[in-house]
């Protein structure tokens, strides 16, 4: 994955925010002894509307932290980071040079009303790389800051293992702004689904 040095800052922010949440001073509302930190790995399929109706496949890695000792009104608020590489399984109607990889981080809200089913929604900002053809370059590389919006559901299959189905929509601002082509300035909006499993470090036993 060709992630840029900028992503070191993204990962640093994630670690700092995680540590800060763990030290928050508030009364607990659940009988928990471990950090509710989870990591997951999934299989993704995305489309790139600017280059036709085809799709491309890849892998997604994510990590989520939901603090314990916070005011009850904030229960369900957490922080999630993800990294994704889309570079195989291209459909025949997608140009063969199209690919992308990203890393992003941002807030996530998980609705924990039910013990074994947790719907959630998230918003993230990050950095991405993309390859695609232009009128003068058979393979043009571009890097951009991006934002993501996503939602999905997590389902518990064992004490610590959950499965997840996720939808994500991306905004790559000012995409195609480069010299020597006839492609007008605009925005790129990849979108797709990820299915996978995650492991919860720390069991959750609410009163």
Image (cartoon, rainbow, N blue to C red):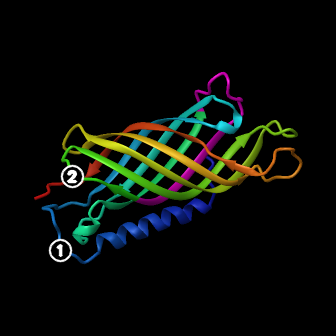
Q: Which mark is residue 113?
A: 2
Rendered image quadrant of residue 18:
bottom left
Span shown in magenta: 88-107
Residue drawn 12% across the image and 62% down it: 31
Residue drawn 63% across the image and 43% down it: 100
Residue drawn 35% across the image and 57% down it: 109
In space, the residues marked 2 and 1 are separated at their CA atoms by 19 Å
> What residue does disc 1 label?
27
Q: Residues within 10 Å of mark 2 (few under 14, many from 20)?
A: few
Secondary structure of the residue carrying tag 2 is: loop
Rendered image quadrant of residue 14:
bottom left
Q: Residue furthest top?
A: 92
Image quarter where the N terminus lies is top right
Rendered image quadrant of residue 198:
top left
Residue 169 appears left or right of 19: right
Image quarter where the C terminus lies is bottom left
Q: Is residue 9 above or below residue 4?
A: below
Mark 2 and mark 1 lie on one chain; the one further toward the N terminus is 1
**Residue 143 colored magenta?**
no
Q: Is residue 33 above or below residue 111?
A: below
């Amino acid at each position: 994955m060709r992630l840029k040095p900028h992503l070191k800052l993204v990962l640093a922010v994630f670690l700092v925010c995680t540590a800060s949440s763990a030290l928050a001073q508030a009364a607990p509302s659940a009988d928990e002894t471990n950090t509710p930190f989870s990591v997951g790995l999934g299989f993704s399929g995305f489309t790139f509307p600017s280059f036709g109706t085809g799709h491309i496949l890849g892998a997604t890695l994510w990590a989520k932290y939901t603090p314990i000792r916070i005011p009850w009104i904030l229960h369900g608020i957490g922080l999630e980071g993800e990294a994704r590489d889309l570079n195989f399984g291209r459909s025949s109607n997608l140009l063969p040079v199209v690919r992308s990889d990203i890393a992003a981080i941002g807030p996530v809200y998980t609705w924990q009303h039910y013990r074994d089913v947790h719907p959630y929604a998230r918003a993230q900002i990050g950095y991405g790389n993309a390859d695609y053809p232009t009128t003068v370059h058979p393979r043009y590389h571009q890097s951009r800051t991006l934002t993501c919006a996503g939602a999905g559901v997590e389902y518990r299959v064992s004490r610590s293992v959950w499965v997840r189905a996720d939808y994500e929509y991306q905004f790559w601002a000012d995409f195609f702004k480069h010299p020597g082509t006839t492609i007008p300035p605009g925005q790129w909006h990849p979108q797709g689904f990820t299915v996978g499993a995650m492991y919860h470090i720390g069991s959750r036993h609410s009163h």
